[in-house]
Image (cartoon, rainbow, N blue to C red):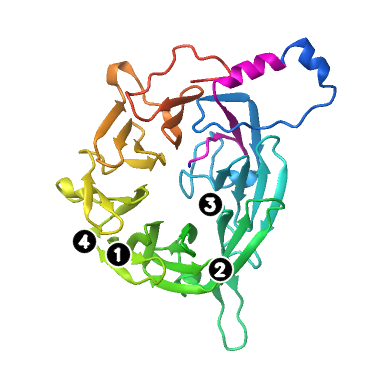
């Protein structure tokens, strides 16, 4: 999920997500009887709500500087590596990644309850802002680090990716780690090099490294920690249904949708060559591929097992970024509009465009399990299934629905 984050200068704060029962709990705790009974402050507990409908701004928890370092300017605007902060939320913990390590934060009080570091020198000291979120794989969080390999004897200097699997249980230490040597371009690239853990399934974890128009993907055995396969040129986007799906870089600015077997790395299907193609996950067995082609085939939802089109996105959406809510909906935003699309059929559910009935679309920050959270003077939560969200005219200062 995209973590709900309010970007402030040098800080980021998570708001406590609540259900409707939180109102009653809060009013009860403010009575004189309750205050007298608690002479010592009790540790706050977080009740899960999936999805949250209310957010308590009084329960903000500051995250460490690594959550936004290199990402925001003084106005709180995201820059650098992209919209997704290097943060994974899991139960009542936040896993915050930096170029050199990962911190585990208690979301109830902001304490650091665990930490792991990369074992080596970082590849590029100015990579803050280009770190991607880690991914959850069962009871472990997969975190890749880009490291240098010093020259030794007749061997020249190089680069490698270290994959660390951090346990989601105390004391939040590495369950295992392994390294894979990278191609020469990773050390020589003039562009920013990024490493992304894509996912894991049936004993294989997939890591992708990209930079300067180059890419490579690796399949790593999660039991033996050995390298199972290598796919040069493949920028993997999603794993699932026994496949790893992504874009194969074949020419400058030109890619081919490609799926390989998750266990062996052998090719399962290949799409058509597309200029300036963009691919995103769009569901458990679906990816979205968009390009500048003329006609309906320029923006489609593909089945990951066959590569065949499941549906076509609504017209005019090719330049719009979409996020899957991990339930049934794609929420698409591009500044001037917020659009909801059925992830299975490509059907337009609702749209809120700039200027419609004198309204201005809010800035979407989180999409999760049938709800979206947006910022319009404050944090607001709406259903993703429509109709288009309507903001309350005078929201209460600390809780919104």
- The residues colored magenta run 2-29
Residue indicated by mark 2: 223
Q: Residue at x 56, y 25 (%)?
A: 55
On residue 252, which mark appears?
Answer: 1
Marks 1 and 2: in contact by CB < 8 Å? no
Q: Disc 4 versus disc 3: distance between alpha carbons?
A: 31 Å
Callout 3 secondary element = strand
Marks 3 and 1: in contact by CB < 8 Å? no
Which circle's residue, 4 or 2, is located before the other in the chain?
Answer: 2
| Residue 312 position within the rendered picture, expressed as x and y whole percent measured from the top left | 21, 44
| Residue 56 position within the rendered picture, expressed as x and y whole percent measured from the top left | 59, 24
Which circle's residue, 1 or 4, is located before the other in the chain?
Answer: 1
Q: Disc 4 versus disc 2: distance between alpha carbons?
A: 35 Å
Mark 4, mark 3: which one is toward the viewer? Answer: 3
- Indicate whether 150 appears above or below 92: below
| Residue 333 position within the rendered picture, expressed as x and y whole percent measured from the top left | 36, 36
Marks 2 and 4: in contact by CB < 8 Å? no
On residue 136, which mark appears?
Answer: 3
Q: Nearer the viewer, residue 178 or 351?
A: 178
Residue indicated by mark 4: 272
Mark 1, mark 3: which one is toward the viewer? Answer: 3
Crowd band around label 3 with a 10 angstrom C-alpha radius: few (<14), some (14–19), many (20+): many
Callout 1 secondary element = loop
Q: Disc 2 versus disc 3: distance between alpha carbons?
A: 16 Å
Mark 2, mark 3: which one is toward the viewer? Answer: 2
Q: Disc 2 versus disc 1: distance between alpha carbons?
A: 37 Å
Q: Residue at x 45, y 68 (%)?
A: 218
| Residue 49 position within the rendered picture, expressed as x and y whole percent measured from the top left | 54, 31
Q: Disc 1 versus disc 3: distance between alpha carbons?
A: 33 Å
Determine if residue 110 is in view: yes
């Amino acid at each position: 999920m995209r973590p709900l984050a309010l970007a402030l200068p040098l800080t980021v704060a998570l708001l406590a997500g609540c259900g409707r029962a939180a109102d009653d709990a809060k009013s009860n705790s403010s009575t004189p009887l309750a205050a007298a009974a608690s002479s010592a402050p009790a540790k706050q507990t977080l009740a899960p709500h999936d999805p949250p409908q209310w957010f308590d701004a009084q329960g903000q928890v500051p995250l460490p500087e690594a959550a936004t370092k290199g990402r925001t300017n003084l106005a709180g605007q995201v820059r650098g590596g992209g919209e997704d902060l290097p943060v994974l939320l899991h139960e009542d913990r936040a896993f915050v990644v930096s170029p050199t390590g990962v911190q585990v934060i208690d979301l109830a009080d902001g304490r650091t309850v665990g930490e792991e570091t990369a074992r080596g020198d970082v590849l590029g000291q100015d990579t803050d802002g280009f770190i991607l979120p880690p991914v959850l794989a069962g009871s472990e969080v997969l975190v890749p680090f880009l490291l240098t390999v010093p020259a030794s004897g007749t061997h020249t200097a190089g680069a490698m990716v270290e994959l660390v699997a951090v346990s989601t249980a105390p004391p939040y230490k590495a369950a295992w780690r392994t390294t894979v040597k990278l191609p020469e371009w990773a050390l020589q690239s003039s562009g920013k090099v990024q490493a992304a853990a894509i996912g894991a399934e049936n004993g294989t974890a997939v890591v992708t490294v990209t930079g300067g128009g180059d890419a490579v993907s690796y399949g790593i055995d999660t039991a033996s920690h050995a390298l199972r396969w290598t796919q040069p040129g493949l920028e993997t986007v999603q794993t699932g249904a026994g496949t790893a799906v992504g874009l194969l870089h074949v020419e400058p600015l030109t890619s081919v949708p490609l799926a390989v077997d998750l266990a062996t790395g052998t090719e399962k299907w290949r799409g058509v060559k597309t200029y300036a193609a963009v691919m995103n996950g769009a569901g458990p067995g679906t990816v979205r591929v968009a390009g500048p082609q003329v006609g309906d085939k320029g923006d489609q939802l593909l089945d990951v097992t066959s590569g065949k089109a499941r549906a076509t996105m609504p017209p005019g959406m090719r330049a719009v970024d979409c996020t899957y809510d991990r339930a049934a909906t794609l929420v698409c935003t591009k500044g001037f509009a917020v659009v909801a699309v059925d992830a299975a059929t490509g059907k337009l559910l609702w749209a809120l465009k700039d200027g419609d009935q004198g309204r201005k679309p809010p800035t979407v920050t989180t999409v999760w399990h049938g709800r979206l959270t947006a910022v319009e003077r404050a944090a607001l939560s709406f259903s993703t299934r429509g109709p288009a969200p309507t903001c309350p005219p005078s929201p209460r200062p600390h809780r919104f629905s």
